Each structure stands twice: as structure tokens, then as C-alpha cells.
Image (cartoon, rainbow, N blue to C red):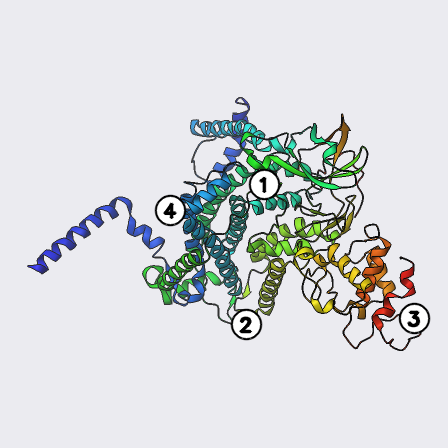
């Protein structure tokens, strides 16, 4: 860096002196040299300090959050043919998360080992959907989105059906891969076959 | 004697002032700031909104700092400290109220200020930067308002962040990572609150102060806009001389000759905030930010109600554009307004398009906000068990029809369909549905849905559909006939239209 700096200064400083028409600073003067060194060093220092700052701020942008299997409890808690509210502990919880660490979800037991687990968040704008067992519909309180019992879009503005969790039954327990807030940019379930609204 | 003593005191005071002035040049600073000369015409009630907005900001800074003495921005404790502030800390509830109402006043007065500036053509040459810095101040203020809602860390705040994340997630390509950055992780957590706290308490207030310095500097440099006269056009060649002539002719120092009305308006604003805080109190907090309490009914504060309404009313294919593309375009247009319209008439009477824009904008915002507050698109979640069927819709009906009335109630139809105005308003009122639709049409609508109604074919047994349709056919004003299929030859009105309808062969298919 340093050896290059004086080379660059000469033409710029000459131009400056010519325009002003006064001998403010001779092109190769000591002051000019110090100024150029000072600017160069600050550009370098600025680049150095921005690396940790940007790295810190942007760390969550690119970070991957691999999802592990989370136990929702014994399958016997979810009678066949029903849809029930369940909740799990956020696998990425912090000690100061408080009650936010418990994430709700809707569990639909279709038959035997066949389950569907839906995110609580409406696919429209993320409000909590509610299950109505009588009409077999999920309804959203925000903008009137409605979904059928299998999560398909039934009415209202949602652009797709409910977000689902990847789920499986192991040793009589229902397990899901949870821990993210599903959104249109990241629905969070790679096994899901997205259906249009 | 007395006169002599008085003179001595005055001399001493002047001496002290002279010393201070000699060292820190107060009178010179005064002359270039508070004492700067303004056109006499601007000492008007129309010109008090800028200083009133600034006053609101000062109130927000003071009360916000004081609230931070007790508030803990931790996911586990924020709600508890809000309750402590509201119920235990002496006058905590009142300071929360002042901070909340201060924000409402600030947003409202800022909008009035901006409207006045726009209608008076003050954004034109040479005050472009004054206007542009003002637009930045508006954006930052709205940012403060949104992050402030999150500081009131209750269930609305929790789901409000969820709405913010859902909108962010719609960004093409980078939606997922952007949501993670907004939340500080894969899901709403304590780190999310810390992020919004940092924005609300450090980043945005710091930015707003910096831009206000620029805004006020521009007011001093380029002067306050003279009262516009119809026919007097702004011309880049001549305006500076024109303005200098006005100042020379009728200029007077802002302090003390121009500030009187600002002071009165300021006092009214302070008293207004104090009264609102005392009468209405602070907002919330409502239930704790516990995501498993899913009975939440999230609504934003009033300045974002119109966005909430747009999110409901936009057709699906336009929504992402409306939420992500339109706001930056609108802000950019607002920001660049002085370059789109730099010279010419300033007076509103010569700018009908400007007046129409303002009227249209306020009507739209007002209407959208009203819709946001009433949310006619939202199902009334408890109507099916809270709203009774009015008696006159049950008396004199057949057992089958009454069975249908039970289905109508039991299957949450009432959440979207009112009967005689009672119930949800998402779908049409069913009080007279029998005079609009025939039995086959009703059966089709129930089974297949459509027009924003879910299909109930799988969720209702054929017997339930049969009873429901029979009941709805019977819902028509007394003395009128039920709707008839115009493709079929009309039949004379039957003696008992209800019984006739429920025995309609069309139902046989379902029953």
C-alpha cells in the first residue's frame, strides 16, 4: 500500500495546484504526502473495522439453522380423526426468551401413523389461525383467511395452504422438525409439496 | 436611592452577560438562529405545525428516556416490567400514556405540517433539501412508531412482528435470509426484541436528531416559505432576490416577534397530550407475548391501520407488489417531489392537482383506516356461540328448517354471515337469502363454496345440507315468494312457500 501512495498523489495534486493557480502545497510537499498517507491509512482502517461490524450485523442473514427432530409427545394424546393444538420448545431458545420459547402448532391425526402438523401462522401474514372442529376449518382473525382440515386454502387472501412441519412417528411418539417461523421466503419444510391457492 | 440600586443591578447583569457573550458569542449565535429574520406573513397559525412536531419529539425523548429507567428489553421480562411501570411505579402509567399519546400527536401533527408545506408550495426552489430532509424525518418517525409498538411487548407486538416477518418473507429470492436478519434468528425470540429495542432507542432517535439538524439548518439557510400569492410564480433566476426583498421589506426576528403563535400552539399540544394521557391512559399491554395463547386478535396502532386494510383488500396477485414495491416507490416520489415540480405557482388556488391529491390521499387513508378498524373481512370468531339466532327467524318453522338453523349456528356459518345484522359481515347477511337464491343455487354454494366462501361438501352430511338449504330457502320477508329459477316456467306462489321449498326435488339429490 504505502509505496503506491506517492505515485498516485502526483497527478492529483498537480491538477489541484493548476486549478487554484496558487502554490497552496507543492505536489511533493511533506504536508501533501502526510495527507495522502493519512487518507490511505484511514481507508485501510475503515475496511478493517467494517469487517467485524458487517460480519456481526449480517451473521443472521446467511446463518443456517439445521432443524432437528422434536418430540411432540405420545401419539395417544392425539385421538384419531381430530385436530388439536400442541406446542413445542424452540430448539434455538435462549434463557431469556421467556414464554416466547413455546411454539404452538396444529396436529391433525388422520389415521394410524398418518399425521399432519401445521404451523400456527397464516400463510398470508403470519397471524395465528384457529381450528373449528364443527365446520372443519381453520380461520384467521386478521384478514379472513380460511383453510380446510388438510391445510388447503379455502378462502380469503392467503396465497397458499397452511405451512406444514415435516413429521414422523417414532416409538409411538410424534416428532416434527420445528424451530423456524415459516414464511413465503422460507416455508421450512423441504418435503412439502406446495399447492397453489 | 432605589433608582441608583436598580442601575447597579442592571449594570452588574449586563456585565455578566457581556462576559458570557464575549467568551461564547451568544448574541451572535442568537442572531443567526432563533433571531433570524422571517417574512411577516409567515407569522401565521398555518406555520405552527413544524415547531409543534419538534415539541412532540422533545416530549418523546424525555418520556422515553424516563421509561427506559424501568423497562427491561428482555423477552422474559419486558412484559413484567411493562406491568410494573403501569401498576407499581409511581406515575409510570402516566408517563407511558404521555409517550403513547405523544407518538400519536407527533405522527398526526407531522402529517398536517407536511400537508401545509405541500399546499403552500414550500418544497419548490430553493427549499428542495428542506423538503427532502422532511420526508426522511417522516420515514424515521414511522419507523419509531412501528418499533415503539413492539416495545409494548404484548401479544399484539408478538404477532405484529410476525406480520412484519411475513411481509419481509415475500421479498423475491432473499425473503428467507431477510426474515432471519429481521428476527435475529429463525423464529421470533428475545433477540428480535433486542433488535427492535436497539432501533427504537439508539439508531432511529440518533438518525432523527441528525436529520433535524439538517432540516433546521436548511430553514435558516433558505428561509421560511413566504405566504404564497396567486400569480406569483417561483423562478429560479429571480426567486432569491425576490425573497431577499421580502425580508428587507417586512422581515422580523423569529424570536421574539414571530414565535408567539408557535408558543401558544405548543402549549395546546402539551396540554392535549397530557389530557389524552390522563383521560384515555396508556395503550395496553394486553395479554403477554405467549404464542400459545392463540386467541389473539392482532391489530396495529392507528397509523398503520391503512396498511392492515390494504393487506386484506388487495387481490392475491397484487399483494406482494402492494406491500413491497409500492412503499419504496411512494417514498421515492415524495422524496423527489421538488425535482418533479420545482418552479411555478405556489398558491393552492392555482394548483388544483395538488389540492385533489391531498383530498384523495386523506380520503383514501381515512377510508382504509376505518376499514382497518372495523375489519369487515375478518370472521367474527365467536359469533357462532355468542350471537343468538333472532327469535323471528325461528318461530313458525318446520322441524327440518329448525334443524337447518342449528346447522347454520353449529357449523360457524354465523362467523361470516350475519342474520339480520347479528354476526360476522364477511359474507352476505342471510336474513333474506331465500329471496335471492333458489334451493339448488344455495345447495351448490354450500357444497362447492366459491366467491370467497369455503366449500362445505366434505364437512357436512347430505342430511345437514338438506336441512340447511331448507332453512335458508325459508328466509324471505313475509308475504313474498322465495327466489325462483327464471329458466323454469313460473308457478303461482304456493300457499305455504316454506314447506314447498323444503320439499323441492332438487334437495333429493343431497338427501
The relative height of residue B352 versus residue B169 in the rendered view (above or below) is below
Q: Are the residues tagged 1 and 4 within 8 Å (C-beta)? A: no
Q: Residues within 10 Å of mark 2 (few under 14, many from 20)?
A: some
- Residue B90 is marked as 4
Q: Earlier in the sequence, mark 1 or mark 3?
A: 1
Secondary structure of residue under mark 3:
loop
Find disc 3 in the rendering and name its residue. B487
Q: Are the residues tagged 1 and 3 within 8 Å (C-beta)? A: no
Looking at the image, residue B458 sits to the left or right of residue B429; the answer is right
CA distance separating discs 1 and 4: 27 Å
Q: Earlier in the sequence, mark 3 or mark 2?
A: 2
CA distance separating discs 4 and 2: 52 Å
User: What is the number of callouts on the image?
Assistant: 4
CA distance separating discs 1 and 3: 56 Å
Looking at the image, residue B47 sits to the left or right of residue A99; the answer is left
Q: Name the front one of labels 3 and 2.
A: 3
- Residue B290 is marked as 1
Give the camera-side residue of B305 and A170.
Answer: A170
Q: Earlier in the sequence, mark 4 or mark 2?
A: 4
Q: Name the front one of labels 2 and 1.
A: 1
- Residue A140 is marked as none
Looking at the image, residue A103 sits to the left or right of residue B413; the answer is left
Amino acid at each position: 500500500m504505502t509505496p503506491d501512495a506517492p505515485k498516485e498523489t502526483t497527478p492529483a495534486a498537480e491538477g489541484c495546484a493548476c486549478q487554484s493557480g496558487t502554490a497552496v502545497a507543492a505536489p511533493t510537499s511533506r504536508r501533501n504526502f502526510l495527507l495522502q498517507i493519512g487518507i490511505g491509512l484511514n481507508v485501510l482502517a475503515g475496511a478493517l473495522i467494517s469487517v467485524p461490524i458487517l460480519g456481526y450485523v449480517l451473521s443472521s442473514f446467511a446463518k443456517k439453522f439445521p432443524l432437528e427432530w422434536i418430540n411432540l409427545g405420545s401419539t395417544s394424546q392425539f385421538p384419531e380423526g381430530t385436530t388439536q393444538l400442541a406446542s413445542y420448545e424452540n430448539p434455538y431458545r435462549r434463557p431469556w426468551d421467556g414464554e416466547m420459547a413455546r411454539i404452538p402448532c396444529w396436529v391433525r391425526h388422520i389415521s394410524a401413523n398418518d399425521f399432519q402438523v401445521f404451523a400456527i401462522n397464516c400463510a398470508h401474514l403470519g397471524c395465528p389461525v384457529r381450528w373449528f372442529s364443527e365446520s372443519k376449518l381453520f380461520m384467521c382473525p386478521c384478514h379472513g383467511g380460511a383453510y380446510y382440515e388438510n391445510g388447503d386454502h379455502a378462502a380469503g387472501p392467503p396465497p397458499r395452504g397452511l405451512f406444514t412441519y415435516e413429521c414422523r412417528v417414532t416409538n409411538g411418539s410424534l416428532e416434527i422438525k420445528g424451530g423456524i417461523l415459516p414464511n413465503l421466503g422460507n416455508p421450512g419444510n423441504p418435503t412439502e409439496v406446495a399447492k397453489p391457492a | 436611592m432605589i433608582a441608583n440600586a436598580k442601575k447597579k443591578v442592571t449594570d452588574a447583569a449586563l456585565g455578566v452577560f457581556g462576559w458570557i457573550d464575549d467568551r461564547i458569542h451568544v448574541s451572535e449565535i442568537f442572531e443567526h438562529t432563533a433571531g433570524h429574520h422571517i417574512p411577516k406573513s409567515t407569522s401565521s397559525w398555518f406555520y405552527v405545525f413544524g415547531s409543534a412536531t419538534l415539541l412532540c419529539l422533545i416530549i418523546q425523548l424525555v418520556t422515553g428516556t424516563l421509561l427506559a429507567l424501568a423497562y427491561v428489553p428482555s423477552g422474559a421480562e419486558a412484559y413484567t416490567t411493562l406491568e410494573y411501570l403501569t401498576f407499581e411505579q409511581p406515575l409510570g402509567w402516566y408517563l407511558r400514556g404521555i409517550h403513547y399519546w405523544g407518538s400519536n400527536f407527533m405522527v398526526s401533527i407531522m402529517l398536517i405540517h407536511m400537508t401545509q408545506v405541500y399546499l403552500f408550495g414550500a418544497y419548490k426552489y430553493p427549499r428542495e433539501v428542506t423538503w427532502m430532509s422532511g420526508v426522511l424525518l417522516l420515514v424515521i418517525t414511522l419507523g419509531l412508531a412501528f418499533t415503539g409498538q413492539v416495545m409494548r411487548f404484548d401479544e399484539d407486538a408478538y404477532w405484529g412482528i410476525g406480520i412484519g416477518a411475513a411481509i419481509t418473507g415475500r421479498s423475491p429470492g432473499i425473503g428467507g435470509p431477510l426474515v432471519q436478519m429481521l428476527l435475529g434468528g429463525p423464529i421470533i425470540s428475545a433477540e428480535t426484541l433486542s433488535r427492535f429495542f436497539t432501533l427504537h432507542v439508539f439508531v432511529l432517535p440518533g438518525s432523527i436528531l441528525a436529520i433535524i439538524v439538517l432540516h433546521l439548518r436548511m430553514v435558516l439557510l433558505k428561509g421560511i416559505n413566504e405566504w404564497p400569492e396567486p400569480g406569483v410564480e417561483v423562478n429560479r433566476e429571480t426567486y432569491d432576490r425576490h425573497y431577499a426583498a421580502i425580508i428587507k421589506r417586512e422581515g422580523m426576528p423569529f424570536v421574539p416577534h414571530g414565535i408567539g403563535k408557535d408558543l401558544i400552539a405548543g402549549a395546546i399540544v402539551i396540554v392535549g397530550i397530557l389530557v389524552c394521557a390522563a383521560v384515555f391512559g396508556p395503550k395496553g399491554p394486553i395479554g403477554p407475548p405467549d404464542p400459545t395463547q392463540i386467541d389473539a386478535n392482532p391489530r396495529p396502532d392507528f397509523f398503520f391501520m391503512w396498511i392492515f386494510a390494504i393487506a386484506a383488500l388487495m387481490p392475491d396477485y397484487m399483494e406482494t407488489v402492494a406491500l413491497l414495491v409500492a412503499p419504496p416507490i411512494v417514498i421515492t416520489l415524495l422524496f423527489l417531489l421538488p425535482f418533479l415540480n420545482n418552479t411555478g405557482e405556489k398558491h393552492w388556488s392555482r394548483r388544483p392537482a395538488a389540492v385533489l391529491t391531498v383530498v384523495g390521499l386523506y380520503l383514501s387513508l381515512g377510508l382504509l383506516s376505518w376499514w382497518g378498524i372495523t375489519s369487515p373481512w375478518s370472521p367474527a370468531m365467536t359469533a357462532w356461540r355468542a350471537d343468538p339466532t333472532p327469535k323471528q327467524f325461528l318461530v313458525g318453522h318446520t322441524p327440518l328448517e329448525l334443524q337447518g338453523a342449528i346447522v347454520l349456528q353449529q357449523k360457524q356459518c354465523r362467523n361470516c354471515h350475519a342474520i339480520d345484522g347479528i354476526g360476522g359481515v364477511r359474507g352476505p347477511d342471510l336474513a333474506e337469502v331465500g329471496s335471492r337464491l333458489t334451493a339448488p343455487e344455495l345447495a351448490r354454494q354450500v357444497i362447492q363454496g366459491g366467491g370467497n366462501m369455503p366449500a362445505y361438501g366434505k364437512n357436512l352430511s347430505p342430511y345437514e345440507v338438506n336441512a340447511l338449504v331448507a332453512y335458508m330457502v325459508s328466509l324471505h320477508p313475509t308475504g313474498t315468494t322465495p327466489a325462483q329459477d327464471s329458466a323454469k316456467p313460473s308457478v303461482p306462489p304456493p300457499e305455504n312457500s316454506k314447506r314447498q321449498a323444503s320439499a323441492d326435488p332438487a334437495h333429493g339429490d343431497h338427501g
